[in-house]
Image (cartoon, rainbow, N blue to C red):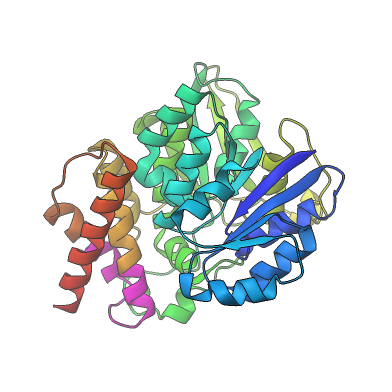
Amino acid sequence: MKRIAILGATGSVGTSTLDLVEREPDRFKVVAVTAASNVEALADAARRTNAELAVIADAGKLPALEAALAGTDCRAATGDDAQDEAACMADLVMAAIVGTAGMKPVMSAIKAGVTVALANKESLVTAGRLMMDEARRRNVAILPVDSEHNAIFQCLGGRDCDDVARLILTASGGPFRTKSAEEMAAMSPAQAVAHPNWSMGAKISVDSATMMNKGLELIEAHHLYGLPSEQIDIVVHPQSIVHSLVEFIDGSQLAQLGPSDMRIPIAHALAYPDRMETPCERLDLAKVGELTFEAPDPERFPALRLARAALEADASRPIVLNAANEVAVASFLDGKIGFAEIAARVEDALEKIDVAAPGSIDDVIAIDAETRARTSERIVA
């Protein structure tokens, strides 16, 4: 039986993970669950799985969590130490905390030798070199959960990248794929979060609309697979059936196909190196009819250029890119800036904020905080 800790148990990846592990109680045992502030959902997850530890990030809600878990054997806790404990008490940790808050428990899990199923994009974007170096030192497996990186992982089939010519990340193109630059500039937050294929949170939906999500995935792919920027391409694939491809040096390409359901890559990570059944709808290619591909437009989607430039600069640039983007997206969702200003604010931060490359997770967090503060000041000004 595999012991599982779910960091971010009340989010979309966390709830999908719970759905899968609860279907196979003889195979998985949930030992720890965490959440940011949703006491009711966290307590429900802990009760249903008989978890040993439930951690709430919002310290003010600890009494409510303790009350909700009264009569169970599950311990309620809060704080960084509790997050780290949750991450380290399992055989596999599903790292699904959104944002930089997920970095420290992921690093703690790596140092403890725990296999990491990684759904926290920011961990690799901002601290990829530090985390992958530590994982190699500890011989810890990092299993990608993002559909694109999981697709590449499956296509590689356990091989290294010595015979790989390039990785090809697919992008849906988001809700504004066919819009002109002028039309995109006038788009509202409600229009930006209306993704055509995936049901996601507001922030990642906006990232899809700007295609910053694909820029961040480019940086992730570099850290996961060790290939330079010039060997990682992006192609727009509106149907979101082909989740990514690997091209080998002989010219052949392998692709992973499937429906737009995150439970498939989650299940792959949970069961690896084996497979497990999922309740997902099966792919019917005849019903799909056709699969189309096109090159992304760098003029309408400047986020791709910014992300690639950040990756090719130094280790501090992706941190600035990610933090400035989060501030800009939040400002857009709050109606403070227009859609076209998101990428402009990120580019401004990359040009104006000059910091040294990080040597530790604490350095990453400090650069992140400085970037957020300075980007917010410039938006308010």
* Up-down relation of residue 183 to residue 151 (above or below): below
Task: Name the quarter where the N terminus is drawn.
Answer: top right
* Up-down relation of residue 187 to residue 343 (above or below): below
Q: Quadrant of residue 65?
A: bottom right
Task: Name the quarter where the C terminus is drawn.
Answer: bottom left
Is residue 293 something that shows in the picture?
Answer: no
Q: Which of the two residues, 134 or 246, is positioned nearer the viewer here? A: 134
Is residue 370 something that shows in the picture?
Answer: yes
Q: Which of the two residues, 354 or 78, is positioned nearer the viewer here? A: 78
Q: Would you say 322 lies left or right of 111 here?
A: left
How many numbered dots are placed on residues in this image? 0
Classified by dominant secondary structure, the portion drawn in magenta counts as helix
x and y percent of residue 142 in the render?
55, 35
* Up-down relation of residue 77 to residue 355 (above or below): below
Q: Quadrant of residue 248?
A: top right
Q: Which of the two residues, 77 or 28, is positioned nearer the viewer here? A: 77
Query: What residue is at 56 percent from the left and 31 percent from the top?
Result: 113
Query: What residue is at 63 percent from the left and 71 percent from the top?
Result: 66
x and y percent of residue 102 in the render?
46, 53
x and y percent of residue 86 in the render?
58, 50
In the rendered image, residue 333 lying in the magenta stretch gets the answer yes
Query: What residue is at 83 percent from the left and 42 percent from the top?
Result: 27
Residue numbers of the magenta segment: 328-346
Q: Which of the two residues, 335 or 370, is positioned nearer the viewer here? A: 370
In the rendered image, residue 317 lying in the magenta stretch gets the answer no
Q: Would you say 201 lies left or right of 49 here?
A: left
Query: What residue is at 70 percent from the left and 60 percent from the top?
Result: 74
x and y percent of residue 72 in the render?
76, 65
